[in-house]
Each structure stands twice: as C-alpha cells, then as structure tokens.
Image (cartoon, rainbow, N blue to C red):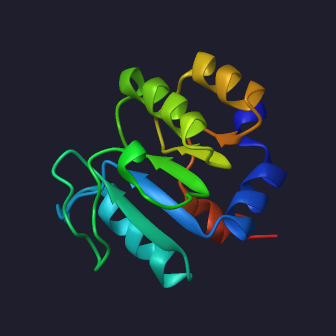
Amino acid sequence: MAWADESDIRQILADCQTWAVVGLSNNTSRAAYGVARFLQGHGKRIVPVHPSAETVHGEPGYASLADIPFAVDCVDVFVRSELAGAIADEAVGINARAVWFQLDVMDADAYTRTTAAGLTMVMNRCPAIEWGRLGPS
C-alpha cells in the first residue's frame, strides 16, 4: 500500500513540526483530542482546525486551513472519508508538506491528487500508533 509507506511515515513523524489537526475540538472523548495531546507531548506544535475555532491544548483554533496565518508542515485529518478529499486539496492549497488521514479515512483519488502535487501522504494510520511502531527516522 503506497499510502502506508514506512519511510514516508518515519519522514513525516521526524520532519513535520507543525501539525494542523482538522476536526480537533475540546471533546475529550474524540480521538483527535488524544492524538493532538500525544503529538504535543512529542514536541510537535498542534493547530486546531474546526468550524468552532476553539482553543485546544492551549493552542488557538482556526475555522479552516486557509485561516492559519503561518506555515503548516502536516495536515492531520479527522473527518469522514467523503469529506477528507476536500481537506487534502486545501492542504495542497496552503503548501503543506504532508497530509495524514487517520484510521478508517481513505480516499484513493485524493491520494493521487495530493502526491501528484508533491506532498507526502499517509492514509488509514494514526501517528500515535505509528510513533510507537516505527518512531521517527
């Protein structure tokens, strides 16, 4: 599976410092909340992206990727598969370096478009799990 290439996973975990977490809110029962905390605990800057633009884990939120006024390295996507492709296209539009679709989030066409635009992309994986399994390079 090209979208789960271990060298791409290691590279993203090692090189991406600023992670826009799409779907992140203060709902502690959602996976995005715990994964964002995990990334912060490993020295990554997280940027909450949610229509409510809440501050989460001490970081101010933004309603969309386009609203973020600084560079983002990785866009971590916690939305349903049918919505994820549009987020990947937005990631290309903001010149992110990578896109990460969480567990059970898949869109083969988005993978093709995103990688053709030069971004590294991982799908159907969780960075917290992959960190423990592979670690950053």
Q: Left of 35 or right of it: where is 75?
A: right
Answer yes or no: is residue 128 visible.
Answer: no
Q: Left of 20 or right of it: where is 23?
A: left
Q: Left of 48 or right of it: where is 119?
A: right
Tell me the quarter of the image containing the N terminus: top right
Q: Quadrant of residue 58?
A: bottom left
Vertical relation: 51 (above or below) 9: above
Q: Quadrant of residue 73?
A: bottom right
**Residue lying at the far top of the rendered structure:** 109
As rendered, which of 88 and 26 lies closer to the eye? 88
Picture coordinates of residue 37, whole percent (x, y): 39, 74
Vertical relation: 125 (above or below) 43: above
Picture coordinates of residue 71, whole percent (x, y): 56, 59
Look at 78% across and 32% down and name the residue there.
2
Look at 46% across and 56% down and name the residue there.
20
Look at 35% across and 31% down and name the residue there.
80
**Residue lying at the far front of the rendered structure:** 69
Vertical relation: 19 (above or below) 89: below
Answer yes or no: is residue 103 visible.
Answer: yes
Picture coordinates of residue 28, whole percent (x, y): 20, 66
Tell me the quarter of the image containing the C terminus: bottom right
